[in-house]
Amino acid sequence: MKRAFLLLLIAPVPLLAADKASSKQVRFGVEVAQQGMWREALFRFERAVELDPDNASAQNNLAVALEQIGDFDRARDHYERALDLKPDDLYIQQNYDLFREADDKRNRKKRTSRR
Amino acid sequence: MRRPAALALAALFAGSGCASFVEVPVETPLQSKLDVSRFRRILIAGFVTDLDPSDVDLSSETSRLIQNQLRSNTRVQVLEPDRPPLEDALQRILAGIGEQGGYASEEKEQYALEADRLLEDPEFWRKMGEEYQQPLIVTGKLGFEDQNRSGFQAEERVVRRSDGRPALVRGNRYMERKGFSLSADFFFIDSRTGELLHKERFTEEVLYGEQQRVSPLSSYFELMDRLLPNFLGVITPQRIRGTRVLLQ
């Protein structure tokens, strides 16, 4: 009984550690993104997502970085994942709306060029 | 509308320490409509314009402007013939129609028809390609016209009544609004085959109030300035600028 109680207390510790490490990567990623170093930011946000796939900020930021380098399919996936995690987040919703607007433009261009 | 609301909320949350966000500028790539990587050279062959006298030499001004833009925005070699090579062919059409000077409407129509035929004649473009080492050829039709949208427009004014209180008065006022419109049909031609690769029409219009006196040439440049990014988007990759929010 005592052992089970201890296990319950200890179990969340690795999860919390991963959560903290993920947030650290996110913070550094934001710092470098602000300096325009998007490749480095992308690496950091990817690490953050690996460490904690349920980190909505990391998912959102990864989507932004992917959009910036032109990987739109993956950007869409991560925006959607971020919205699944935090459906009421206005920032993520706003980013996603702007992404879709830009994506429509790109698709219109593709359609015209195929004509 | 969404953005200001979101930012206002953001400020609220940031103030209370609930959220941390950073707005960053992003530039997302936008592919060109045409893949022109197989061309090393580009030739602006000149443009068909109508026969009415104009304050702007549309064909040569546009050729020059596009050449300058291509030189700064692309890696292809921009060919610079002494005069746009389409000019000679258009002159031959004109010579077949009659004396230079004022043209009757049937003559203008005939010229327009023959010029259209020339624009879509693969053999003509293939021969031009042989002469200029098979570049991508840009040509087309241009129109630049006066616009007059003067007329009565509804307006509201606040006046003082005899008792000194303000009152809203609705009425109509004659407003002079004149300007210009520019239309451009661009043809992108593969001069190895003479085949039309892409055709696109752009139109722009500008109107000025009664106080503004703008020359046709200035107005033409204003309209071309708006139109050129769309033209360049056909053959060079563009970037969509915007902002996104990073979360911490």
Image: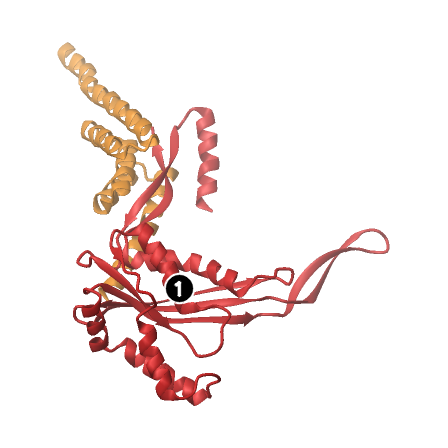
Q: Give x and y (percent) for residue B146.
A: 53, 71
Name the kind of residue labelled 1 in the image.
Thr
Asked whether residue B160 is in view, the answer is yes
Residue B39 vertical placement versus B108 (above, below): above
Residue B168, image quadrant: bottom right
Colour orange maps to chain: A
Chain to which mark 1 belongs: B
Residue with the most extreme top position: A2
Q: Give x and y (percent) for residue B238.
A: 31, 51
Residue B248, image quadrant: top left
Residue A79 vertical placement versus A8 (above, below): below
Position of A16 with respect to A102 (left or right) is: left
Position of A60 with respect to B134 (left or right) is: right
Residue A95, image quadrant: top left
In depth, the one of A69 and A28 nearer the eye is A69
- Residue under the point 39% across and 28% down: B19
Colour red maps to chain: B
Name the element at disc 1: helix
In depth, the one of A18 and A105 nearer the eye is A105
Q: Give x and y (percent) for residue A97.
A: 35, 47
Q: Give x and y (percent) for residue B2.
A: 44, 45
Position of B5 with respect to A30 (left or right) is: right
- Residue under the point 43% across and 68% down: B58
The colour style of the image is: by chain
Classed neighbour count for the residue bearing mark 1: other residues with Cα under 10 Å, few (<14), some (14–19), many (≥20):
many
- Residue under the point 32% across and 33% down: A36
Q: Residue under label 1, please give it.
A: B62
- Residue under the point 43% across and 24% down: B17
Position of B71 with respect to B211 (left or right) is: left
Q: Quadrant of the N terminus of chain A?
A: top left
Q: Quadrant of the C terminus of chain A?
A: bottom left
